[in-house]
Amino acid sequence: MTELLNPGEPAPEFELRDIHENLIHLSDYRGKPIVLAFLRGFL
Amino acid sequence: MSRGAEILAIGPDGLSEFRAYWNKEKLPFIGMPDPGHAVAKRYKQNVNVFKLGRMPLVCVVDSHGFIRYAHYGSSMSDIPENKILLEVIDQLNAAS
């Protein structure tokens, strides 16, 4: 079992492009609550 | 989303497949393909090789960038109820 992230830890920063190809950083949304949903999928 | 929260969804599909799904379902939040799984790995999203699947993971991050809730799904359908997420967000808003 891999170690998981736990409440109280800093959320790891990331950058990804959205479906419109805008570059999104997690930190762009600092100042408001964020729900991060990692979707299920097949390997 | 009401309550001033932002929803960011990250999925394992490539851009064209992900975009087609997003447009078909008319999803109103930000969708980001992560086909290399770099971010999914950084967040320790579970992969079950026996189920051939990448299990859902939902985190709530507070306004300062700290994780306040994390639910690592143990099956493809193991997703927290919206009610639970809204309660967490309400608590964060009440505390800020």
Image (spheres, coloured by chain):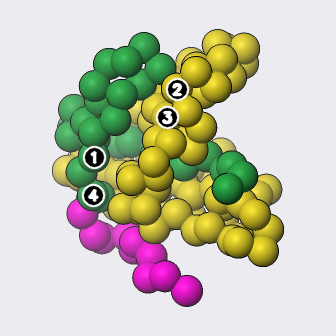
Q: Are marks 1 and 3 in contact (CB under 8 Å)?
A: no
Q: Is residue A12 left or right of residue B7?
A: left
Distance between the alpha carbons at the discs numbered 4 and 3 = 17 Å
Have a look at marks 4 and 1 and say if they share a chain. Answer: yes
Q: Is residue A36 left or right of residue A16?
A: right
Magenta stretch in the rendered image: A1-10
Residue annotated with mark 2: B15
- The chain whose colour is green is A
Chain under numbered label 3:
B
Distance between the alpha carbons at the discs numbered 1 and 2 = 17 Å
> In front of the other: label 1 or label 3?
3
Residue A29: % across, % down:
26, 34
The amino acid beneath tag 2 is Leu
Circle 1 Cα neighbour tier, 10 Å, few/some/many (<14 / 14–19 / ≥20): few
Q: Nearer the viewer, residue A6 or A2?
A: A2
Q: Is residue B19 magenta?
A: no
Q: Are marks 1 and 2 in contact (CB under 8 Å)?
A: no
- The chain whose colour is yellow is B
Q: Which mark is residue A14?
A: 1
Residue annotated with mark 4: A12
The amino acid beneath tag 4 is Pro
